[in-house]
Amino acid sequence: MVFDREANEPAWFKKLWDAHRVAIITYRKGVKDKWDEYRFQPYEILISTNKSTMQICEQGSLIQDIWFREVRKLNGNGHQTSIITTHPSIDIATIAKNMLSRWTQENYFKYAIENFDMVNRLFFFCIQSTSKKSSSFVMYLCLLTKYCGYFLNK
């Protein structure tokens, strides 16, 4: 699952992975340090139909006593965008692509919420599904759907 910064809760991310093998990708909050620029390597990444070359690198990071993979993108002006994930093996180009292209998903959800009452319909569907299957994963989906709707309507 790909989250924006507002959903940043490392303990919950660890629980999602440990209990359900659901990996997250999100921006890291409060990053003040800079990694050495010589560590960044060029990766060609396709976002939608646009191909671009990004300077990215990876290292492990301990956040609130939880180990994460951290990927950073180096911008032309020296700014480093930090991304964390609980996924143990996805390649770093895919991590960067998924996080940096999330705006396409946000635009879709915003449109669907405004025009099709998507959040309420999905939430109702999840309640129906949960009562029949009692799956904790479906319950997480319900909570996430409601959570996403809350932030999109802010």
Image: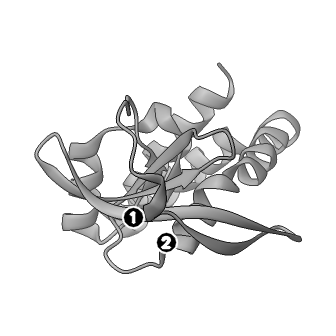
Whether residues under marks 2 and 1 lie with C-beta atoms below 8 angstroms apart, the answer is: yes
**Residue furthest top in the image:** 154
Residue occupied by mark 1: 58
Q: Residue at x 10, y 45 (%)?
A: 65
Residue 129 in the image, given as x and y percentages of width and height: 49, 62
Q: Residues within 10 Å of mark 2 (few under 14, many from 20)?
A: some
What amino acid type should be assigned to the residue bearing mark 1?
Glu
Q: Is residue 128 above or below residue 52?
A: above
Q: Residue at x 57, y 73 (%)?
A: 94
Residue occupied by mark 2: 92
In the depicted view, which residue is nearer to us: 53 or 149? Answer: 53
Residue 74 in the image, given as x and y percentages of width and height: 57, 51
Q: Is residue 153 above or below residue 105?
A: above
Residue 49 in the image, given as x and y percentages of width and height: 89, 71
> Is label 1 in a helix, a strand or a loop?
strand
Residue 24 in the image, given as x and y percentages of width and height: 41, 58
49 sits to left or right of 100: right
Q: Residue at x 65, y 54 (%)?
A: 100
What amino acid type should be assigned to the residue bearing mark 2?
Ile
In the depicted view, which residue is nearer to us: 96 or 80? Answer: 80
